[in-house]
Amino acid sequence: MRKILSIIVLLALTACKSTQTTPSAEKNTEPDYSKALLAGQPALERVPTKQWPDLGIAWEERDLFLRDSLDNSIAWFDAPSSKQWFPIEGITHEQAKNSVIAIRELLATSKTKNEFLYKLETNFDVYRSVGCDDAGTVLFTGYYSPDFYASTKPSRRYNAPLYTRPTDLVTDPMSGEPLGRKLSDGSIATWPSREEIEASNLFNGNELVWVEDNLDAYIIHVNGSARLRLDDGELMYIGYAGKTDRPYTGLGASILKAGLLPTNKLSLRNIRRIYDRNPKQISTLIDKNESFVFFREYDGGSWPAGSLGVPVTAERSLATDKKIFPRGGLVLVDTNIRSLTGETQTFTQFMVDQDTGGAIRAPGRADLFMGIGPTAGIKAGNQYAEGNLYYIFLKPESVAAVQH
């Protein structure tokens, strides 16, 4: 399953300002969205009832996809292994699990918006991410699960390999975070950079599959999963199996710095156009992202799966930093999205925190899963807006009353 299902749109992370706006293109004038928490600082703050966001709008937008997403989280909570991630932010495993069960029931049984809001206020607390500025500002980008053509054998057309996880990759047994490369003497060293790995053909013999070019391979690296259409007509599903401990640098940031595109023209489509004209130019910038990702094949029945190991759902699953936020719970996302034609639309919707991402670090970042295939890719590529992120949990005194 994916541990970093991340994001692109290959956009640069810039500054932090007011909510529900398109971030400014100005550089180095405001705090970084990826600003880390101070030692001991909580990622969530409880919101007084009178300051709650408009949860009624989200209730009106509920659908079967939200129900299915909540069911997927309940299945995850039912597994004993989920208990290892709690408590976090003062939320216990029982509280987190029962919150999802109770909210699913409340969404299904409330006959009116007012009934829903009354019961929510009676039994639940709302928490807001402190964001990048301690005022709740979060940058919401988008990600998707792409389709690519591929082959299990290299050829002139299929020349960019994706690799399986090497046996000497060491990761934290609890968090899955990469620790380095285990050497023959038992010590652990930092992995080579992406450029060094590819120049030395370090993983020759570990190829899982070949795609058409380096940009396709890189997009799959950043998204963490893909559905591949093989040259024999079969479908192959691949997902994240680990990554090196080298730092992540977004391709979008490198393209802006190189002056290849202005901020308002930065999109995956335009990056592809530059690559097709001059592959070496973009490949050189790809190498600035030193992190390198590994893959494994898995059953398409659960594809695409997030870091919880359950399927993610279009516009209902969210990726956040799992080092600081509780897993599997219901959230409210209050931001803007853009339509396929580029029009800005308000997005105030319940989602479920079921994934994480290599670029999604700190309380000021979150990633919206937009779906599968080219249309979802356009929506993900357009997604770059500030907003607020809220978590909804049962009050401690209401936890024991939930039946499951």
Image (spheres, rainbow, N blue to C red):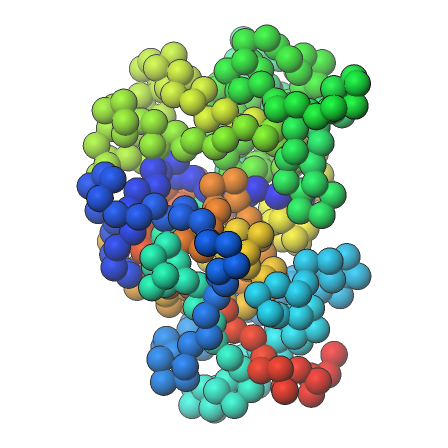
- Would you say 69 lies left or right of 289 here? right
On screen, residue 221 above or below 84: above
Asked whether 166 or 181 is in front, the reply is 181
Estimate the x, y position of residue 389 in percent, counting from the top left. 42, 63
Identity of the residue furthest to the front in this view: 39
When the figure is inspected, residue 140 is found, relative to residue 144, above or below; the finding is: below
Which quadrant of the structure image shows residue 375?
top left
Q: Is residue 339 visible?
A: no
Q: Nearer the viewer, residue 352 or 123?
A: 123
Quadrant for the C terminus, please: bottom right
In the picture, measured across the screen, residue 329 lies left or right of residue 369, that is: right
Q: Is residue 12 visible?
A: yes
Compare residues 382 and 385 and report the one nearer the observer.
385
- Decide: is 97 above or below 240: below
> Residue 234 appears in which quarter of the rendering?
top right
Where's the N terminus, which quadrant?
top right
Which residue is drawn at the image coordinates 45% and 20% (left, top)?
Answer: 287
